[in-house]
C-alpha cells in the first residue's frame, strides 16, 4: 500500500495548481498526482481563448463580469459563488504569472485583452491562441521543482476507496480513503491511501464522440464519485461549442476559438448569408448556447453538414499574430483563412455540471474534494461564460488548499483491502469494447444532443440499458484495462446526463428540449 497526505487525480490546471500551492506552503506534507497518459495530456493543454479576469478597471468592472456570467448561466448560477470567483480572479492570475506563465501584452505593455461570446468587455488574458498549453507548461515546471510532489504519469484511477470497500457502516456518512490505481505500463494495481483525495479529472466530451476534447475526457472522476454515492448535479447542461472545425471523419474536432468571433469573424450559411443577426442582437457574440442552437437550426433547415466562419475581411497580419495555431491548423486542412471560409460545426465542449462542491471544494463525501471541470460549483448555472473555466479551477484550487492548510491530517490506521481480481481474465474480444463505445457515442449525439425531446431521451435510456448490461458483464469477468474502465465510466456518465435531462422540465441555457419550446422560439 502507498500512503500520502494528498492524492490528486488529474494533472490539468485544477490538480496541478492545488498540488503546487500545497507543496510550496507545506514542505513537510506530501502530494501524489496520478494521471492517465502523458503528464500534460488534459483539456487544459488545448485551451485557446484564455482566462477571463477583470484587469482594466476603467472600462471594465467586477460587476460587469458578474453580470455577464449570470446572464450566460440563464438564471441558474449561484450568485455568491459568481461574485467570489470573479473577485478572486486577479489574485489567482498574479500567482500564475509568478510561476512564470506568460500572457500577451499590447504595445503599451498592458495585457492584451481578448473578447469572447457573452462578454460585454475585453477581459480575456491569453497566450496567443495556445493559453492552456502555456499554463500547463508553467505549472508542470513548478511541480517538478517541488520535491514533495510525486507525479505518476500513466497511472489510471479506477475507483475511490470508501466505506463501501471497507465494508464499514458509519452513521456519520461516507468517507474517502484514497483510490485504487492501475499502473498502465505494467498492469499492477496500487492501493493508494490518502488523508485527502482531490478529483481533478476533467470533463466528459468523449461521451459524445464528436468533441473538441482530447481522448482523456471520459468523465472518470464523475463516474467514480457517482458510484461512491456523491451528489452529482446539473449534468444535463452540456455545452456545445459553436465553432469546431468540421471533420467529416468525426472523432476529435479542432477548436476555432470564440476569440476569432471576438476578433470580428462572421458566421455564414452555405448560401453565404450571415444569419446570426437574425437571431440575436449580439450576433456572433451571443453566448455559445444560443449560437450553437442557431447553427443547429440553420443546419436542420438546409440539411447541410456545416456552416462557415468568414475571416476574409479581417486584418490578416493581426490575425496571424493572435491566432498562429488556428491559422496553421487550417492550412494543414488546405484552408487559407485569408481567402477561404472555415467549415465549422458545433461539438460537445464542456460540462457545466458535475460533482457538487461547496466553496471549499468539499463534496458530499468526507475527505473527498473536487476541482475544475469535474466539479459543479454553481458558477456556470445552465451555461458557462467563455474563459470562466480556467478561472474557476484556479480559484477553487486555492480555496481547497486554504481549507486543507489548516485542517489536521486524517492518519487513522485502516485495513484497506487490496484490489481483488479473482476470477477475471484478459478480455478476449477487445472489439466488443469498441462496438459498445461507438454505439454509446452515436446514441448520445443522436438522442441527447443540442436539441432534445422527451421521446428521444426515453429511447436513449432504454438503449443505454442494453449497453450498460453488456459492459457490466464484461467488466466483472475481465482483468482491468484502461479502455474498459473508461467505457464503463462513460456509460455511467451518460446515464446521469440522460436521467437528469429527463428531470429538467424547462429550457435553460445549454438545455433545450423541443417539448418545452416556448412559442416563437
Ligand atoms: P483537465 O485539464 O481536463 O485535466 C484532467 C486530468 O485528469 C488529465 O490530466 C487527465 O489525464 C486526468 N484524468 C482523467 N481521468 C483520470 C483517471 N481515471 N485517472 C488518472 N487521471 C485521470 N476554458 C477556459 O477557461 N478558457 C479557454 O480558452 C478554454 N478553451 C478550451 C479549448 C478546448 C479545445 C477545450 C477542450 C477546452 C477549453 N476550455 C477553456 C475548458 C478548459 O480547458 C477546461 O475546462 C479546463 O482546462 C479543465 O481543467 P481540469 O484541470 O479540470 O481538467
Ligand atoms: C475558445 O477559445 O473558444 C474556448 C474558450 C472556452 O471554452 O472558454
Image: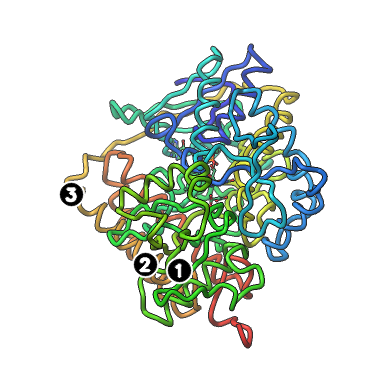
In the image, 383: left or right of 83? left
In contact (CB < 8 Å): disc 3 and disc 2 = no
- Residue drawn at (48%, 50%), measured in percent from left and top? 316
Kindly report the distance in space between the C-alpha atoms of the residues bearing marks 3 and 2. 22 Å
Residue 429 tag number: 3
Q: CA distance from mark 3 to mark 1?
A: 29 Å
Secondary element under disc 1, as helix, strand or loop, is loop
**Of tags 3 and 2, which is closer to the observer?**
2
CB contact under 8 Å: marks 2 and 1: yes
Question: 106 or 16: nearer the eye?
Answer: 106
Nearest the viewer among 463 and 117 is: 117
Residue 101 seen in the current view: yes
**Mark 2 Cβ and ligand 1 under 8 Å apart:** no
Tell me, for residue 448, which label it has, or none. 1
Residue pointed to by mark 2: 443
Q: Are marks 3 and 1 in contact (CB under 8 Å)?
A: no
| Quadrant in the rendering for residue 169 | top right
Name the residue rendered at 40%, 66% in the picture.
Answer: 445
Amino acid at each position: 500500500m502507498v500512503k500520502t497526505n494528498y492524492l490528486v487525480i488529474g494533472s490539468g490546471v485544477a490538480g496541478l495548481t492545488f498540488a503546487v500551492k500545497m507543496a510550496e506552503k507545506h514542505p513537510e506534507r506530501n502530494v501524489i498526482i496520478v494521471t492517465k497518459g502523458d503528464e500534460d495530456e488534459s483539456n487544459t493543454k488545448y485551451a485557446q481563448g484564455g482566462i477571463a479576469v477583470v484587469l482594466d478597471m476603467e472600462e471594465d468592472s467586477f460587476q460587469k463580469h458578474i453580470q455577464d456570467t449570470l446572464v450566460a448561466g440563464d438564471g441558474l448560477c449561484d450568485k455568491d459563488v459568481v461574485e467570489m470567483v470573479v473577485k478572486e480572479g486577479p489574485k489567482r492570475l498574479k500567482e500564475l504569472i509568478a510561476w512564470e506563465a506568460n500572457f500577451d501584452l499590447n504595445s503599451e505593455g498592458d495585457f492584451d485583452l481578448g473578447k469572447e461570446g457573452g462578454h460585454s468587455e475585453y477581459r480575456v488574458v491569453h497566450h496567443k491562441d495556445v493559453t492552456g498549453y502555456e499554463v500547463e507548461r508553467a505549472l508542470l515546471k513548478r511541480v517538478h521543482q517541488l520535491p514533495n510532489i510525486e507525479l505518476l504519469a500513466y497511472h489510471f484511477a479506477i475507483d475511490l476507496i470508501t466505506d463501501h470497500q471497507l465494508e464499514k457502516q458509519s452513521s456519520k456518512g461516507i468517507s474517502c480513503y484514497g483510490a485504487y490505481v492501475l499502473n498502465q505500463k505494467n498492469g499492477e494495481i496500487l492501493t493508494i491511501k490518502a488523508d485527502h483525495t482531490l478529483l481533478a479529472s476533467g470533463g466528459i466530451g468523449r461521451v459524445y464522440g464528436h468533441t473538441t476534447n482530447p481522448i482523456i475526457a471520459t468523465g472518470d472522476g464523475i463516474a467514480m464519485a457517482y458510484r461512491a454515492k456523491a451528489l452529482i448535479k446539473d449534468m444535463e447542461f452540456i455545452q456545445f461549442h459553436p465553432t469546431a472545425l468540421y471533420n467529416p471523419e468525426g472523432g476529435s474536432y479542432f477548436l476555432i476559438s470564440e476569440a476569432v468571433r471576438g476578433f470580428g469573424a462572421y458566421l455564414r450559411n452555405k448560401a453565404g448569408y450571415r444569419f446570426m443577426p437574425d437571431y440575436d442582437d449580439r450576433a456572433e457574440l451571443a453566448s455559445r448556447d444560443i449560437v450553437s442552437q442557431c447553427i443547429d437550426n440553420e443546419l436542420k433547415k438546409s440539411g447541410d453538414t456545416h456552416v462557415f466562419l468568414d475571416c476574409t475581411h479581417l486584418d490578416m497580419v493581426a490575425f496571424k499574430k493572435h491566432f498562429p495555431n488556428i491559422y496553421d491548423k487550417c492550412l494543414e486542412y488546405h484552408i487559407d483563412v485569408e481567402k477561404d471560409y472555415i467549415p465549422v460545426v458545433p461539438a460537445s465542449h464542456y460540462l457545466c455540471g458535475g460533482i457538487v462542491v461547496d466553496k471549499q471544494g468539499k463534496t458530499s463525501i468526507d475527505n473527498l474534494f473536487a476541482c475544475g471541470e469535474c466539479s459543479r460549483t454553481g458558477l456556470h448555472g445552465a451555461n458557462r461564460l467563455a474563459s470562466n473555466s480556467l478561472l474557476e479551477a484556479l480559484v477553487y484550487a486555492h480555496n481547497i488548499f486554504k481549507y486543507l492548510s489548516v485542517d489536521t491530517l486524517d492518519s487513522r490506521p485502516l485495513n484497506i483491502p487490496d484490489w481483488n481480481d479473482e476470477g477475471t481474465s484478459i478480455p478476449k474480444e477487445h472489439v466488443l469494447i469498441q462496438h459498445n463505445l461507438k454505439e454509446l457515442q452515436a446514441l448520445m449525439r443522436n438522442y441527447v444532443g443540442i436539441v432534445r425531446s422527451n421521446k428521444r431521451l426515453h429511447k436513449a435510456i432504454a438503449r443505454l440499458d442494453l449497453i450498460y448490461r453488456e459492459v457490466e458483464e464484461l467488466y466483472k469477468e475481465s482483468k482491468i484495462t484502461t479502455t474498459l474502465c473508461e467505457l464503463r465510466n462513460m456509460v455511467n456518465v451518460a446515464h446521469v446526463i440522460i436521467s437528469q435531462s429527463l428531470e429538467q422540465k424547462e429550457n435553460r441555457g445549454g438545455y433545450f428540449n423541443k417539448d418545452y419550446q416556448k412559442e416563437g422560439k
